[in-house]
Amino acid sequence: MAIKKQYAVIGLGRFGTSIARRLHEAGQEVLGIDIDEEKVEDALAYVTEGVISDSTEEKALSSLDITNFDCVIVAIGDDIQASILTCMLLKNLGIQKIIAKAIGKRHGQVLEAIGVDLIIYPERDMGERVANHLLSPNTLDYIELSKDHNLEEVITPSKMIGKNLRELDVRAKFNVSVIAIIRKGDMIIVSPSPEELLQKEDILVTIGSKNDLVKFSSID
Ligand code: ADP
């Protein structure tokens, strides 16, 4: 289990609730805050403590001892003004790490100017994920390394099973590097040798440009 940390989630809508629930499941301490009493009551099952409070009120925020928290997540969406004001107050209070949800580009730009450490665009990111899944059905998961490059977990194409990386020549043919193989779910072969024979259900951890990876993960 991860080291126990203290998180505060402000805004217990769908997004905030999902974060709070997952952190709580992982044994972390989670303070849930919402202006709406009903939202706080609904969240009590998966937060360590729930507080009804308006996060745009400086006094209310300071009274929560929020400066002691390792990370504060601002999950207020539709009320952009409240989201911005809350982030500004948290920044002024010197919070170590602020993560905030942005509902659009402009909202995100303001949060960035305030100095929010990580800005999440849930709808944009989810839309991209769905499109990527359609383009590359064999990709299980990915991390965006840059605008053009990804690290991806790709199911081994069936025609590659039983062959080794040397004969497949993935790097030359697809411009993609296989940096690890995940075998039988939990065995990880880091920097596999060129002689490594690919087995059924192997997952290839690959790095490459997004376009090259789309081609690689679309092989039958
Ligand atoms: P989602 O799309 O994740 O459901 P919403 O924007 O609907 O996001 O939910 C945001 C939550 O933030 C709501 O539960 C709302 O009551 C809460 N909220 C909005 N303004 C404030 C505020 N000033 N202080 C605390 N909570 C707030």
Image (tube, helix red, strand yellow):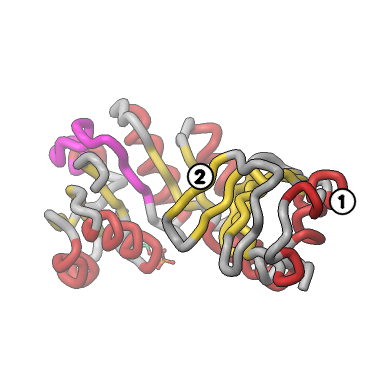
Q: Residue at x 69, y 64 (%)?
A: 162
Point out residue 46 in the picture as x, y percentages from the top left corner. Answer: 19, 64
Question: Which residue in the protein does label 1 denote?
Answer: 173
Q: Is residue 7 left or right of residue 49?
A: right
Residue 63 belongs to the span the image colors magenta: yes
Answer few, some or many: residues within 10 Å of disc 2's Cα (few below 14, many 20 plus, some between 14 and 19): many
Q: Residue 141: which quarter of the image?
A: bottom right
Q: Which residues are magenta?
A: 60-74
Return the disc, 2 or 1, that comes first in the chain's sequence.
2
Name the amino acid type tagged 1.
Answer: Lys
Task: Give the Cα distance between marks 2 and 1.
Answer: 37 Å
Any atom of ligand 1 within 8 Å of the CB at mark 2?
A: no
Point out residue 68 in the picture as x, y percentages from the top left corner. Answer: 19, 32
Point out residue 40 in the picture as x, y percentages from the top left corner. Answer: 19, 65
Secondary structure under tag 1 reads helix
Viewer-nearest of discs 2 and 1: 1
Q: Is residue 67 left or right of residue 125?
A: left
Q: Nearer the viewer, residue 213 or 110?
A: 213
Q: Is residue 130 visible?
A: yes
Q: Residue 22: which quarter of the image?
A: bottom left
Point out residue 128 in the picture as x, y percentages from the top left corner. Answer: 66, 62
User: Does 155 sit above or below residue 74?
Assistant: below
- The quarter of the image holding the C terminus is bottom right
Q: Residue furthest toward the right?
A: 173
Q: Nearer the viewer, residue 88 or 46?
A: 46
Name the amino acid type tagged 2.
Answer: Ile
Question: Which residue in the protein does label 2 denote?
Answer: 119
Count the labels in the image: 2
Q: Residue at x 73, y 50 (%)?
A: 165
